[in-house]
Image (cartoon, rainbow, N blue to C red):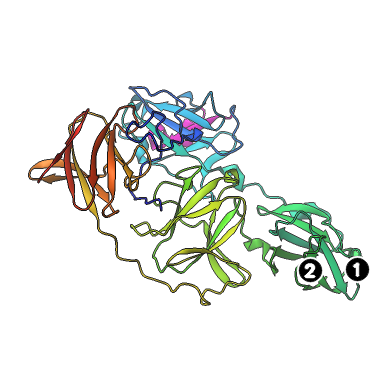
Amino acid sequence: MKKLYKFLLPALLPVMALTACDDKEEIVFESQLPQFELRSDAVLYEVIMPQGTLAEEELYISGAFNGGDELAVGDPRWRLEPAENVDYKWGIYLFPSDFAEGKTPADGFHFVSAVNGAERTLKGLEVTHTDYAALGQRVNITVQRWQSYFEKEEDPGEIEHDGYAVFVDDQTGWDNLYLYQWGEVNDLGGSWPGATPTGTVDIKGVTYKYFDMGEANKGLGQNLIFNNGDGTQLADFGYTIDHDLYVRITADGCEEIDPDNAVTHDGYVVYVADITGWDKLYLYQWGEVNDLGGSWPGAEPTGTQVINGVTYKYFDMGEANAGLGQNLIFNNGDGTQLADFGYTIDHDVYLEVGKAVKEIDPATYVPDGGGDDPVPNPEPTVTYYLYVADNSGWDEMAVYAWGDSEVFGGWPGAVAEEAKKVNGKLYWRFPVTAEGANVNLIFNNNNGGVQFDGPNVTFDHDVYMTITATGAEIEEL
């Protein structure tokens, strides 16, 4: 299991060979590669923009430090430029001399498209970043959506229907959809397998296939059988043709829905029946794309949805991420995590998350029927620490470990979040929650091109050492 901790850094993997671990496969994802050169007199922001953002769009950074949208949009000092080698990254150099007095990006900022509005989360919420760095450093940020994405809505009234209509949110995955009817009139709409959809329409972000039922057929009591025309069919669904009908169908069944409360998903979905008993649930991902959905502990649920009487927490995986091979780590954001669950984002998946993660069938799943009992947070594992007195002179020091496990996360490892004085000497402290792990250490300047092999250590006790720019020495306290 890939063990991760809340102090993980963005997984920028090295392109140089790690001399101490030549047998480890190194993978560099294109989105992780820097596209702009650092400048010693500026802070560099590299930004991944939403899919479909055009290179010619005017994109700006906006916050209290530059007067907000009203002043920033249109000012060339705050306009981002597209990267030359990839079509999804933009960059901007910020010079503190341009900032409003007493303000920096740490006071809050967001990105704005002159055409598509301010950035939004996947749920359509406003965004405020506070990421900031020292001169000569780089900040990486991802923009999820533009405001215009949530303002597009088609009115079904624009379509002239023949009588009432049956609107179908088709989640079956079938290649074809047919509707057969029997009841007061058999073969209404055609003999088996029935009629194909009259057309499609987007309503509140949901794409429906619809069947016009015919003005002349108002008031008829019918039974609807949705099928794929090739031998697979759902159970009969009773319907009197005296109102528009909205249904969601899966390969397992059909349920009536309220279009005003229908859930709009972004791409495929991970549905979670959460029986952990945790106060919080987070989903971290690593695989073809590390930190997909956010750095450790990952993303909180996009929302909740009731399916066949069961309330699921769900995570929208993003239309742009279809096809990626990922590993899912469910955790409580406070040190407790479950084993990795492998998932390719090419289908909706339903999971029960309790003592373990297991796939379930939403058509038959009952939370109290054979599932794991809810459990409180387990006791945390024994934690040891690596204490490092840093005499390297580097702007930023990171430590990577390989061997029994990557106890400090993927390359370049971890940067310490706290320091502690021991016997009057200042040490940076790195927590380890893999008791007994035997690892080899590599110290580096946080993927800045300088690194050296550290000693082999076993974490069955706290480890103290002092490093210079070229080596490390273990201390006995």
- Residue 215 visible: yes
Expressed as whole percent of the image width and height from the top left, the position of residue 378 reads 33, 66
- Residue 388 horizontal side relative to residue 205, left or right: left
Compared to residue 17, the image places residue 339 above or below, namely: below
Give the label on residue 243, or none: 2
Compared to residue 118, the image places residue 330 above or below, namely: below
Expressed as whole percent of the image width and height from the top left, the position of residue 171 reads 68, 58
Q: Secondary structure at mark 2?
A: loop
- Residue 242 visible: no
At a point 60% along the width and 46% down the height, the residue shown is 322
Q: Amino acid at mark 1?
A: Asp
Mark earlier in primary sequence (2, 1): 1
Task: Report, in whole angstroms, how far the alpha carbon at label 2 lies from the one at label 1.
Answer: 20 Å
- The range drawn in magenta is 57-74
Residue 177, by quadrant, is bottom right
Residue 418, by quadrant, is top left
At a point 24% along the width and 55% down the height, the residue shown is 383
The crowd level at tag 2 (other Cα within 10 Å; few <14, some 14-19, many 20+) is: few
Give the label on residue 272, or none: none
Toward the front, the furthest residue is 23
Q: Amino acid at mark 2?
A: His
Report the front residue among 435 and 336.
435
Expressed as whole percent of the image width and height from the top left, the position of residue 313 reads 51, 62
Expressed as whole percent of the image width and height from the top left, the position of residue 368 reads 51, 77
Q: Secondary structure at mark 1?
A: loop
Residue hosting label 1: 187
- Residue 109 horizontal side relative to residue 395, left or right: right
- Decide whether residue 68 is among the magenta residues: yes
